[in-house]
Image (tube, grey):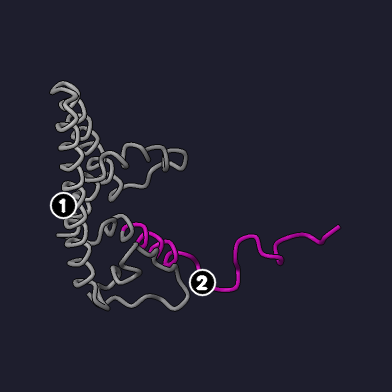
């Protein structure tokens, strides 16, 4: 998988923690993937421990089983939704207006988002498939452009300035 990038062509977009190592799987790509997988799993476990302490606090406060169950279900539902949205985000870009409207969902369901990162890191860098398809499409567009001095809309085609 040793593809060389054209000298004057589109640059690959960087992925957090991976830079552009995802293009050719070089410069420690496998170690980075292992570190991201381990880090996200460790962070999810730490978050679960903190949630456990929070639920123990609810039990010690003796607020009742109903409220504790509602809190538990709320965290579970938000975790599932955060997992789902994070997973979908690895394969498709969100529309511009929808990019930052789920902060509270991710704040509550952070364990689901971390687990999505963990699962995806087992096979590829999170978001690699999306970035690779966009990068290859950009390379194909560049390769299909006509070469030579006649570009589109250059000064030679324009009329004199008045």
Write down the residue under mark 2.
147
Label 2 and label 1: CA atoms lie apart by 54 Å
Image quadrant where one finds the C terminus = bottom right
Nearest-to-viewer mark from 2 and 1:
1
Front residue of this view, candidates 86 and 110: 110
Query: What secondary structure do most residues of the magenta stretch adopt?
Result: loop
Q: Secondary structure at mark 2?
A: loop
Write down the residue under mark 1.
45
Q: Is residue 111 left or right of residue 150?
A: left
Residue 17 position, x and y percent, is: 31, 66
Image quadrant where one finds the N terminus = bottom left
Place residue 128 in its image quadrant: bottom left
Residue 96 position, x and y percent, is: 46, 43
Q: Secondary structure at mark 1?
A: helix
Place residue 130 in its image quadrant: bottom left
Residue 8 position, x and y percent, is: 47, 75
Front residue of this view, candidates 36 and 61: 61
The residue carrying pointer 1 sits among few (fewer than 14), some (14 to 19) or many (20 or more) residues within 10 Å by Cα, namely: some
- The residue segment tinted magenta is 133-162
Front residue of this view, candidates 150 and 27: 27
The residue carrying pointer 2 sits among few (fewer than 14), some (14 to 19) or many (20 or more) residues within 10 Å by Cα, namely: few
Residue lying furthest right: 162
């Amino acid at each position: 998988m040793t593809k060389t990038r054209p000298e004057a062509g589109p640059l690959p977009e960087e992925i957090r923690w991976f830079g552009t190592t995802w293009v050719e799987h070089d410069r420690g790509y496998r170690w980075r993937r292992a570190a991201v997988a381990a880090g996200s799993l460790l962070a999810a476990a730490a978050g679960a421990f903190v949630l456990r302490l929070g639920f123990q606090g609810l039990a010690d406060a003796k607020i009742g089983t109903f409220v504790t169950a509602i809190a538990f279900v709320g965290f579970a539902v938000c975790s599932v939704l955060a997992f789902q949205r994070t997973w979908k985000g690895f394969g498709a870009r969100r529309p511009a207006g929808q990019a930052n409207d789920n902060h509270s969902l991710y704040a509550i369901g952070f364990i689901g988002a971390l687990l999505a990162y963990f699962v995806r890191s087992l096979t590829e860098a999170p978001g690699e498939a999306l970035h690779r398809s966009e990068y290859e499409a950009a390379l194909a567009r560049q390769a299909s452009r006509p070469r030579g001095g006649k570009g589109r809309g250059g000064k030679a085609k324009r009329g004199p300035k008045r």
